[in-house]
Image: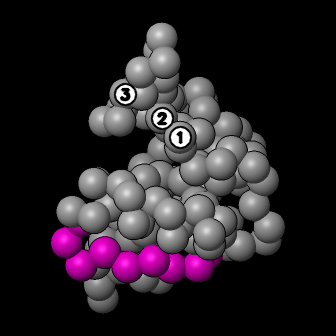
Amino acid sequence: MPYVTPVTAGHPWWRLTHGPRLLHCQNDWCCQVCGQGLEASGWVVVDPRGMVQTDAAMHERCLRLATAACPHLLAVAAQRAAQVRRADIHGDGRPLRDSGALTREQWTVPRLGAA
């Protein structure tokens, strides 16, 4: 079960995201699949414009699992996985700040977007 998938009464809500857990992953550089801390770099799935499709990074092995099983990631046209450092990411169009965001941010990786 992905860490950021909300579950109530044993039922996963696949199309939803657990907001506080996503914030934890964004602010503390943790994997959205397993919830554990990431090393200096993590993996994201981006579209051709450099938009991160799930707004949090993953371990490489968690990325392989997510891209093989997640219908959303399977449906993203021209998706590609990219290894990134926290400094590569922008949140809501600004360099990702080291201090904690109060609301979830739309992540982008500008260097990977179309020129």
Farthest top residue in view: 9
Which label was assigned to residue 31? none
Residue 40 appears anywhere in the view: yes
Which label was assigned to residue 1? 1
Q: Are marks 1 and 2 in contact (CB under 8 Å)?
A: yes
Residue nearest the viewer, comparing 84 with 98: 84
Q: Which residues are magenta?
A: 76-84
Q: Amino acid at mark 2?
A: Thr
1 or 3: tag closer to the N-terminus: 1
Using residue 51 as the reference point, say whether residue 27 is left or right of it.
right
Residue carrying label 3:
13
- For the C terminus, give its image quadrant: bottom left
Q: Amino acid at mark 1?
A: Met
Against 17, residue 2 (above or below) is below
Circle 2 residues within 10 Å: few <14, some 14–19, many ≥20? some
Q: Position of residue 74 (x, y in %)?
A: 27, 64
Residue located 31% across and 36% down the image: 15
Q: Position of residue 114 (x, y in %)?
A: 29, 84
Q: Is residue 78 magenta?
A: yes
Q: Are marks 3 and 2 in contact (CB under 8 Å)?
A: yes
Q: CA distance from mark 1 to mark 2?
A: 7 Å
Q: Is residue 21 magenta?
A: no
Residue located 48% across and 44% down the image: 105
Against 76, residue 8 (above or below) is above
Question: For numbered disc 3, what is the local secondary structure?
Answer: loop
